[in-house]
Amino acid sequence: MSIKSSLFAFTLMVSALSVQAQPLPTGSPESVGFSSERLNRIESFFLNEIERNRVPGAVVAIARQGKLVYFKAFGFADKANGTTATTDTVFQLASMTKPMVAVGALTLSERGQLPLQSKLSNYFPGFGNMQVGIVSADGKISTEAQKQAIFIHDLFRHTSGISSGGRSDSGSRIAAQWPSSAALSKVGNTNDMVNSLNKQLLVHQPGTVFEYGLSFDVLGAVVEQITNKSLGAHLSDTIWKPLKMKDTTFQPNKEQLARTARPFPLDPITGKSQSIQRIANPSSYDCGGGCAFGTMGDYIRFGQMLLNGGALDGQQILSPAFVRLMTSNHLGHDIKNRVAVIEPHRDGYGFGLGMAVRIEPGLSSVPGSPGEFSWNGANGTGFFADPKEQLVVTFGTAAPGELRKYYREQVQNLVYGAFTK
């Protein structure tokens, strides 16, 4: 290694050792079946990625058997401004917002306020009048009525027929007509969002196909209508404050924004311009599909709560029965499972209520156990939990391009590769 490279690596390792208050009780890797030497591969991997200017920095948190055994930051939160990454770096969580919204909504279900088999039109009548788009062989678009209503259950598992524009996995002329998540976050308030969506054509008949889209934005609106609070206020009351997730929010303050990870201006693979839009242009409402910000320390507390059956530090956020419901596969035999279309390494996964669930020991390109649940964020963040192995992992990068998919797979490989038992 050159002198320059050695100095660079030393600087980044100093960053890696700048540890803030610990989000969970700590333990040695060896005490819970990890090899410290093998865990060091994570550091080597990210230092190499950073030195090659593929990513500004990263934060990784790992807990097993309830013990935090790895919590390190590497590189920069904002390289352009020389802001070093630390373990309290804030990330724009994108779709990692969805599992938190699912828990927030299920707290209403367990109180008898939000049955999963209630119709979406009970809350917003316009969704009951939506037509389903049909594209014929010659490319003409026609419509047909819904054969069954959109249920709240469909919002949780992305089987509502609600799509999102600009997604390469949709492959549909109907889906292309839907607004993107970024565009939707600028429409005004929650009611404006709802009214803009229920005028679209559904991409599939409700209850028939997993179609990743804007269902959780609509679910967030339902939560607001039931609680008569903003979505952020409800999540703060039911999850964030009880779990002491102090930096998790839809509306980061000035100090939190100063700690927020920012990507390179140009995608290191394509050379095209890239950005995380919601940092400079926050959503005009609390969008449940992807607008939250938070730290990896906050999120590992959320994941540990789920792994514990809904409780952490004496706070029962969700009942064990509802956690089991949430983390079970909800894509039955009559529903087309397209999870691996949007997450290529997720063959062998189904989808629960707000997150992917592993249902096969093989098929996937990453190690894990049936029952593992997880979801990622489009800006480079990720989360997975394995109940069999008593494992929770969160990681954050500012990588909104295709590299984010590479990091999702590699982090899972590196973590499981560090097991000794």
Image: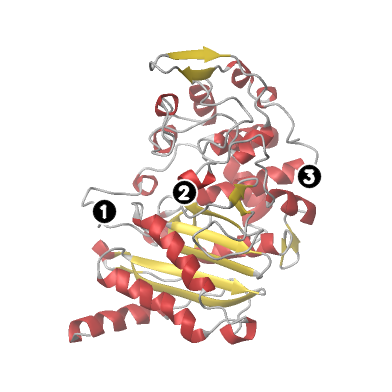
Report, in whole angstroms, how far the alpha carbon at label 1 lies from the one at label 2. 18 Å
| Residue at left offset 54%, top offset 75% | 21
On the picture, is 350 further left or further right than 382? right
Residue bearing mark 2 = 94
Residue bearing mark 1 = 267
Task: Give the vertical position of 254 relative to 9 (above or below).
Answer: above
Q: Residue type at mark 2?
A: Ala
Q: Residue type at mark 3?
A: Glu
Residue bearing mark 3 = 110
| Residue at left offset 22%, top offset 85% | 1
Task: Give the vertical position of 23 relative to 357 (above or below).
Answer: below
Residue 1 seen in render: yes
Q: Residue type at mark 1?
A: Asp
Q: Tell me whether the residue at label 2 lies in contact with that at label 3, contact meaning CB atoms closer than 8 angstroms.
A: no
Residue density around tag 2, few if under 14, some if 14–19, many if 20 or more, within 10 Å: many
- Residue 101, percent from left and from top: 61, 46
Residue density around tag 1, few if under 14, some if 14–19, many if 20 or more, within 10 Å: some
Which corner quadrant of the image does residue 284 belong to?
top left
Report, in whole angstroms, how far the alpha carbon at label 3 lies from the one at label 1. 44 Å
Which corner quadrant of the image does residue 288 belong to?
top right
- Residue 41, percent from left and from top: 42, 78
Q: Name the image quarter holding the C terminus.
A: bottom right
Comes first in the chain, label 1 or label 2: 2
Comes first in the chain, label 2 or label 3: 2
Foreground of the two, 398 or 419: 419
Q: Nearer the viewer, mark 1 or mark 2?
A: 1
- Residue 2, percent from left and from top: 19, 85
Q: Which of marks 3 and 1 is in front?
A: 1
- Residue 173, percent from left and from top: 40, 25
Indicate the secondary structure of the residue bearing disc 2.
helix
On the picture, is 200 further left or further right than 32? left
